[in-house]
Image (cartoon, rainbow, N blue to C red):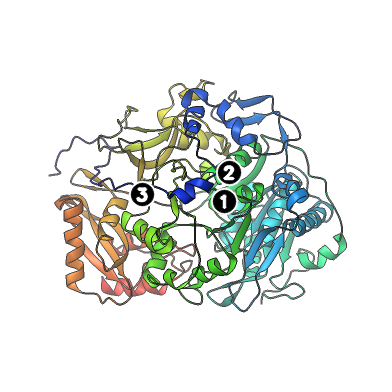
Amino acid sequence: MAEKTDVSEAQIASHWKEEDYYPPSAKFIAQANMTDEGIYERFALENVPDCFKEYADLLDWYKYWDEILDTSDAPCYKWFKGGLINASYNCVDRHLAKNRNKTAIHFVPELEEEKVDHVTYQELWVRVNEFAALLQDFCGLKAGDRVTLHMPMSAELPITMLALCRLGVIHSQVFGGFSGKSCADRIVDSGSEVLITMDAYYRGGKLLDHKIKADEACEEAAKQGQTVKKVLVWQRYAGKHSAETPMVEGRDFAVNELLKNYYGKRVEPVKMPAEAPLFLMYTSGTTGKPKGCQHGTGGYLAYVTGTSKYVQDIHPEDVYWCMADIGWITGHSYIVYGPLALGASSVIYEGIPNYPDAGRCWRIAQDLGVNIFHTAPTAIRALRKIGPDEPAKYDYEFKHMTTVGEPIEPEVWKWYYNVVGKGKAAIVDTWWQTETGGFLCSTLPGLRAMKPGSAGPGMPGIHPIVLDDEGKEVPDGQGKAGNICIQNPWPGMFQTIWGDRDRFVRQYFERYCKDPNSKDWRDWPYLTGDAAIIAEDGYVRILGRIDDVINVSGHRLGTKELESAALVVEEIAEAAVVPVKHDIKGVEPDMYVALKPGYEASDAIADKVQKALVEEIGPIAKARKVWIVPDMPKTRSGKIMRRILAAISNGTDVGDTMTLANPEVVEAIKKMA
């Protein structure tokens, strides 16, 4: 019989010890963009929404707004209503007077023998204008139209985004690693008649045929009733078609060829209402119809500009490298819109971090003088696994490093700080989502000390609260976790789900809404879907998605905490825990671990993992089995596919594995079962 506990369904037993503080260096604080402690008071809950004028004032407006926040259609908020603005102008044109010869984008090809393409703000302006002229004239695009992009990491991707928003056209970029079918679903949902893609790109040293996915996308979209009238194909090598898949007569056009007709053309940026949609970002990885998160122009741009300045600490003279893919929200917010609105130099790298070897990232950093580095725990764990001693070989110095995308285990954080950051860089461990547009929790690096494993307090103007299933607040500092919500709206939050307002309200607001007819934002707390615990100092620790919980004999354990315990073992590079059905306990955990180089799988290592689980959490956390695997099954973006591991542990069908970066690993693990 399951043991009775006094933990509500929303609460997760938390055994995580709070780590020590790591203060930022005096050198960092001396140059930080934000050292004014008063910012937290200015952005206090009673000053919402007016406090966000501070972020909006970082932008150039054609017309100031009439109202900072319109709540008449709560919770579909309109920020800076009545204001007129253009995102392309703010990211490009306004920098020309003082910085036209400054590098806007450093495009680093995957092949080291190919030269880095340094695109200045002047060149970016020329290329954005010429492509906007093409889109307007050749494709007949106008404000409010939707265009789907399915592009790999390239300089042409931000050029395309900025050309579209110059015209007020809503863009929907699909991660380049996604299939043609995934692209089609997004074409259909957004009603796009134009698809912009690239013929080929490099991945792991191979030139991949990307054009084939455009054909699949158009064919599949047509089956669902959406016709793609034009496919614009950027060429990886200008003047040459690099894909085996041929162009389709009358539908497909090489952008590089068409652009010759638009040499010297200039397009005046369209003065867009601040509340007009800027882009759609479809959330991935869930079942059912993809959700198009609709982000507005003025609010979103203000929020990512403000957070880029104060959290990323970007100055115009910095060389900033966010290693995410522009196909995800991180790339939109913190490769393209935020950094370029500030006039920064933003690095875009085409390939994988370990091509041709584990030193590649640090060579790029050394060669370009990168001083701000931004990546995900997935990449940090991978780099720690394949090249733990590599950073020491290279002469670079980061002043600032970001971690984003999922909680980072304290052991991995310490390696990042000591080895990658050489003990000098300030780290911000940021927590946010596709839906939120920008950071929700993070330390401001010039004001707050870092704490491994904790994202830090709510951002200025972001007021998190942890609620149980009944909607009661779980007090800070009591070691109890629950559903983390945000009490107030903020400019970066998405406006709605494209074409599905009911789903938007149901999924994100309905559970804790105090009055469904209310126009007062205080009645509409935002449900993030994450489980979290807030410490006495107000620092937030994310324990994973609410549904990423393993309920062992009534004890609800957060998967991230279990994985973090396994990573305390010196030999372990990566860990993934999955639930396995059990007749009495309900479920019990299976722990999958991959080893650092130089270690061999052994029963002794498996025993050390079990011991760590018991010591760090308690006997309830002991795994049914510790599997030492050659590698974890991963998506093209580097996320561990726990679903596949759970299927193996439970003896069920693993499903389609062909979209994985390493499908052969699944077979190897299945043979062990």
Quadrant location, the C terminus: bottom left
Residue position marked by numbered label 1 in the rendering: 334
Residue 304 is marked as 2
- Real-space CA distance between mark 2 and mark 3, rounded to the nearest whole angstrom: 26 Å
Residue occupying the far bottom of the picture: 113
87 to 225, vertically: above or below:
above
Q: Are marks 1 and 3 in contact (CB under 8 Å)?
A: no
Residue at left 43%, top 50%?
25
Residue 572, horizontal then vertical, whole percent: 29, 66
- Which residue position is annotated with label 3? 22
Q: Are marks 2 and 3 in contact (CB under 8 Å)?
A: no
Picture residue at 56% right of the left edge, 46% below the top: 308
| Residue 252: % across, % down | 75, 65
**Which amino acid type corresponds to the residue marked 2 in the rendered image?**
Val
Element under label 1?
A: helix
Kind of residue indicated by mark 3: Tyr
Res. 148 visible in picture: yes
Asked whether the beta carbons under mark 1 and mark 2 sit within 8 Å of each other, the answer is yes
